[in-house]
Amino acid sequence: MVRNRKTIAIIAIVVVFAGIIGYRIYANYAANKERAAKVTEGRAVTVEVGHVTRQDVQPVLSFSANLEPLWSADISSKVDGRIENLYVDEGDFVEAGTVIAVLDTSELAAQVAQAEGTRYSALATLEQAELDLKRSSILAAQGAVSQQTLDTARIKRDLAVGQLNTADGSLTQLRARLNSARVEVPRSGIVTKRYLQSGYYTKTGTAIVTVSDVTSLLVKATVGEAQLTQIAVGSSAKVNVNALGGQQFSGVVTRISPVATLPARSFTAEITVANPDGRLKSGMFAKADVPGQVHKNALVVPEGALVLREDQQTVFVVTADNKVQQKVLKLGYIGGGWAEVLEGVQEGESIVVAGHNKLKDGASITASTGAGEN
């Protein structure tokens, strides 16, 4: 019981001391603030003044993206087999139609030879069947053989035709497989990835190399619903690449996806950038700036005139008695040194464009000589 009383007493003492210290800190802060207000009271702050004006504003939409090849494909064989020769390596340029690999064709060549033999046999059988049918037709016309014998000869001839067609089909298929053992590139490009080497066994559809067309690259930007009406196919774009020291390249919007991606309801815009000297590499990070639709005769203020107050953008408007009134603005596009004003001020009003860091609402001002009034 005694211990509990001591604990309560200690806590009470701590609370009292904390209250005293807190009061002293607040009192000093209030006193300093009051002294600063008295010092500046009645003193006019020198500022630069401009006017709220109108001008055309062209928003610039910025997107972050990676550079991707204009075209890229995994090149594979149409047949199974061991890679006898692989002629390319990563970084090699290949023309369309170039043979990049050859598979071991010994087994396929043997199958083709066997199929050719089967076809010759089927052809000989057909020739014999046609001769037998011809003789039977002559004899039947003379009454020397029955109609059944003639029908049998005709059926044998038809069967021989079918066998020859089957042999032709098998031979054509095997020859196609033999030709497929030579792996060709369907389109010119750079070998960007090699997956296998000579001596490896590859199966149908397994990628041997990846070939990409990087003479032009794509910047794929994700565009929101609100931004979709601001850009169009054919719009110019500026692409900045950080890996190249922020170097800027010119591009064109070449495609906008017709269907939104759910659930974000966003669209993909493709910006094509020419890459004749190969400086741009697939996978580099890029920032694309696309000009939007021009806002004609928009109400604007200099971007430097904006003052942030409690998460709201404001400006100091100069009143008739050389004082300032801080007004909250509703803004549109901000960029290029200007801010588009939707609500808050009127055209022609004087505003503080520099020196507002010393101001508070209702303060007296004096415009400096270099005020830059419009």
Image (cartoon, grey):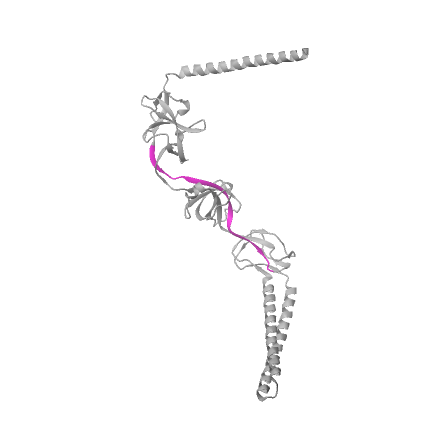
Residue 207 horizontal/vertical position (percent) = 59, 54
Q: Quadrant of residue 171?
A: bottom right
Residue under the point 49% across and 13% down: 27
Magenta span: predominant SS is strand
Residue 179 horizontal/vertical position (percent) = 58, 64
In the rendered image of this protein, does residue 20 appear above or below residue 328? above
In the rendered image of this protein, does residue 70 appear above or below residue 353? below
Residue under the point 65% across and 70% down: 114
Number of callouts in the render?
Answer: 0
Residue 285 horizontal/vertical position (percent) = 51, 42
Examine the structure image and report whether residue 227 is included in the region drawn in magenta: no
Q: Is 290 positioned to the left or the right of 114 in the image?
A: left
Q: Quadrant of residue 364?
A: top left
Q: Is residue 84 visible?
A: yes
The quadrant of the picture occupied by the C terminus is: top left
Examine the structure image and report whether residue 76 is included in the region drawn in magenta: yes
Residue 51 horizontal/vertical position (percent) = 33, 29
Which of the two residues, 279 or 101, is positioned nearer the viewer here?
A: 101
Which of the two residues, 373 or 123, is positioned nearer the viewer here?
A: 123
Magenta region, residue range: 53-78
The quadrant of the picture occupied by the N terminus is: top right
Q: Is residue 289 visible?
A: no
Which of the two residues, 354 or 347, is positioned nearer the viewer here?
A: 347
